[in-house]
Each structure stands twice: as C-alpha cells, then as structure tokens.
Amino acid sequence: MINYISEVFRVRYTETDQMGFAHHSNYLNYFEMARIEWLNKIGFSYAALERQGIVMPVVSVQINFKSPAYFDDPLTIKLVVNEIPKASIKIDYIIMNALKNEIANGSTTIAFLNIETNKPVRCPQKLLEIIESLW
C-alpha cells in the first residue's frame, strides 16, 4: 500500500458557488492535482509518458461529500494506492481541512492507453518499478 499526503492548497474564490462552498465539480480537479503531484514526487513524469504515446484517462470516478470547504480553506489530500496496477490504477483520496477532519473522499480508476490505437496497455514498466519499490 502507498500513502501520500499532498502539499497544502487553498480553495480559490473562483472555485466557490453561490452558497460559499467549494463547488462539487472542483473536487475532481483536487484529485488530479494530488495525483500529478504524487507522480512528480515519486519521479514519474506524466508528460514524458505522453511523449512515449501512452495516456492515462480517468475511466471511473466516485466522490462522497462529508462537509463543505469554503474560500481560502487550507486543504490537504491523502492519496492511497492499494493494488499494484495492471492495465489501470485505482487511487483513493481523502480530502482534509486544516483540523485534519475529512470533508470528502473518493476514488478514480485511470487506464493506461496507447494513444495511437486507443487500446489498453499494461502499466508502464518504470511506473510499476517505482510503485513496487515503495510498496
């Protein structure tokens, strides 16, 4: 199992709705920010992967909202990988406020696709080796 805690980020004013809450659509962006940050921290470049012709589309998303986040709230995201990836990787997320209270949780399943054929491929060897070394 891999656990990673993101850098602190703040809810921007443009991310809030009429009620003053961080709009629900932003939580997918928060998941992506944590995921890209984690990949960079472990030494894996998503941009380099794309240059090699492999992309990682999100194929499944699940989000549960517990309590709202507001403008300028500092948030962190705990990212968890529970399985060694094959042709996809499932990542779980817990979004926490400054008091470390869980305000939302969810998961994404991300496939590995050959961009030319649009067909699934196995997890890139470099990423697999990094994940296995952290296990």
Image: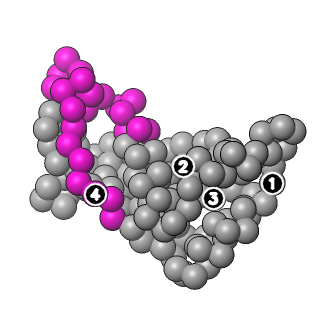
Question: Dot 1: what SS?
Answer: loop
Callout in the foreground (4, 3): 4
Of mark 2 and mark 4, the one earlier in the sequence is 4
Rendered residue at 33%/64% (across/down): 5
Classify residue 20 by image quadrant: top left
Of mark 2 and mark 1, the one earlier in the sequence is 2
| Image quadrant containing the C terminus | bottom right
Classify residue 30 by image quadrant: top left
Rendered residue at 15%/43% (across/down): 73
Residue 81 on image: x %, y %: 52, 67
Of mark 3 and mark 2, the one earlier in the sequence is 3
Give the amino acid type for the residue marked by disc 1 in the picture: Val
Q: Which residues are magenta?
A: 5-29
Q: CA distance from mark 3 to mark 2?
A: 8 Å
Residue named by callout 2:
108
Residue 16 vertical placement versus 39 (above, below): above
Callout in the foreground (2, 1): 1
Q: Is residue 65 magenta?
A: no
Give the amino acid type for the residue marked by disc 2 in the picture: Thr
Label placed on residue 7: 4
Q: CA distance from mark 4 to mark 3?
A: 22 Å
Callout in the foreground (3, 1): 1
Main SS of the magenta part reads loop
Rendered residue at 37%/39% (across/down): 27
Left or right: 55 as drawn, with respect to 92: right
Q: Is residue 25 magenta?
A: yes
Residue 102 on image: x %, y %: 26, 56
Residue named by callout 3:
89
Question: Dot 2: what SS?
Answer: strand
| Residue 110 in view here | no
Of mark 1 and mark 4, the one earlier in the sequence is 4
